[in-house]
Amino acid sequence: MFNILVATDIHLGYLENDEVRGDDSFKSFEEVFEIAVENKVDMVLLAGDLFHNNKPSQKCSARCTEILRKYCMGEGAIQFQMISDWKMNLTHQPNFEDENFNVSLPVFSIHGNHDDPTGKNPLSYVEVLSAGGYVNYFGKYTGMSEIEVRPILFSKQQAKIALYGLGSMTEERIHRLFRSKKVRFVRPDEDTDKWFNIFVVHQNRVEHGTKYLPEKFLTNLPHLVIWGHEHESIIDEEYNEEMGFYVIQPGSTVATALCEGESKPKHVCLLTVAYDPDTDSNCFKKEFIPLKTPRQFLFKTIDLDEAMETRGMSRDMKSKENREILSDFMKEVVQEMIDKAEREHSGDDQQPLLPLIRLRVDSILAQPFFMENVGMSFVGKVANPKDVILYKRKRVQQTKTKTNMDSDKLSSLLAGAQATNNFTIEDIVVRYFKEGDSKNLLTMSNERDLTRQVMNFVDKDVTNAIETYLDANEEEFAQRLMAEVDDFSSEELLKNICSISLEKRAQEDKESDDQPKQQPSKFASKLFDSKIPFFRIHWKCTE
């Protein structure tokens, strides 16, 4: 069987110049290898962001190589074989097959978004470590239009692993490539059903528009997906029933953001892949091992409005008495969190004594100025006194305004356009007004004019283009109606508005290409038949 230790998002060098937190990333990194050696694993697998910066400092790179040299170099037999051509997916010859190195613990790593390849000839610092024989760097693809992901094939007697890797790319680009089916996974040539397929990836897993990688894009090839980039450690069983694979998300080994997800305990994952003679295939089991050296991080949210109501306080923040009561209340909560951290300390002499504390305060009030100083009362007691308090102003629920927008039609047009990947903004605007609900047809404007302003807004970033156009168009109609119309009944107004609109449309069509999009008579008939609620006209009247 294979024993693999999986870790991700080490972020070596994070806050390395901070007197309090500067060593945190290195302590956790060393513990990863202590666990690897203790469990006699075959390899360590890293899922990106080994470094916090693409160009780490000399201090950071030196400490990294010291740890790798200490735990990975030396006499020791490698118990598995790499049977694929390394040139297909590694940047350098595997260090455990190089006669110039004695390697006892191989490390395989992809790059993340923090240590991704940059420059004229894209280079990640992970590649520098690979050239020096410290790690084996895979998953680097520089193709812009198409990617072919080939596996590294390992065997250990009858146990077989096909390791796929894809280093971090911009979220929009990777989403587009997968959606367009431009990412292809190459299966092993022989005994494809007997290989255990592992895919290592470093992208957003949580949905952010198109700035994430949907699991359904990964096809049903992997048996197991190891997900980097997401810092929250999730140790519960995760199985994607639709695609038929499991997902492991070990999370980061150091907190780089003071958010709730980072406050959960940090882990590495001990992965075992073994051959099952009963099914004549390979299966796996996993064990999440908690780290003892990461700095403790406690996160808590309180509702300030409820706290004030409980204490019978007014919302007057100018009151000195109110300020003192609230300040004492929050200091009390912070102290309780510090006491909890002290009780739950691992006892490991490498785990820092000063915890990270984050108190989120929710309120409908604007942030009181005095709250910024609450954390400074805990200098010497917490690692982050300057940002203990996170003040969040609640959103006031607003009543939705009525709209004539045909949401179903717009969604349908957008979905169809994305599916074909062949559309323009002009197509969407014109088709919406032509094919949508009749109540949404344009009365005083026409599609060509409106499209032009939409393009100015989208392409030229003219933020007020549409508003300016509509205001000017409305003013023109108002002036002409005031000058030409005697009867201001609804029916007469509508007829005259349509008449002016048709005249403007015909003029635009003639100036553009002498081929009207629609015959005026049909356009007018469509307007009258639909009983459109015409645009409101704001009259500026004088005595």
Image (cartoon, grey):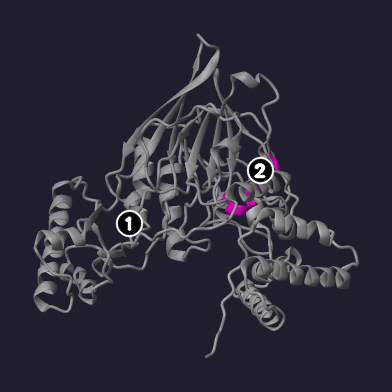
Q: In this orientation, which residue lies closer to the viewer: 78 or 411? A: 411
In the rendered image, which residue does mark 2 sit on? 179
Under circle 1, the secondary element is: helix
Does the magenta-highlighted stretch encompass residue 236? no
Q: In this orientation, which residue lies closer to the viewer: 503 or 187? A: 503
Q: Amino acid at mark 2?
A: Arg
Pick whichever of labels 2 and 1 is earlier in the sequence.
1
Count neighbours of disc 2 (C-alpha within 10 A) and say few if under 14, some if 14 to 19, many if 20 or more. some
Does the magenta-highlighted stretch encompass residue 181? yes
Q: In this orientation, which residue lies closer to the viewer: 245 or 493? A: 493
Name the disc covering residue 95, or none. Answer: none
Q: Is residue 427 left or right of residue 300?
A: right
Residue stretch rendered in magenta on the structure: 168-183
Question: Is residue 539 at least partly visible in the picture?
Answer: yes
Question: Is residue 1 at least partly visible in the picture?
Answer: no
Residue 48, how many percent across, how many down? Answer: 50, 48
> Which residue is located at x 66 percent, y 43 percent?
179
Q: Amino acid at mark 1?
A: Asp
Q: CA distance from mark 2 to mark 1?
A: 39 Å
Under circle 2, the secondary element is: helix
Name the disc covering residue 24, or none. Answer: 1
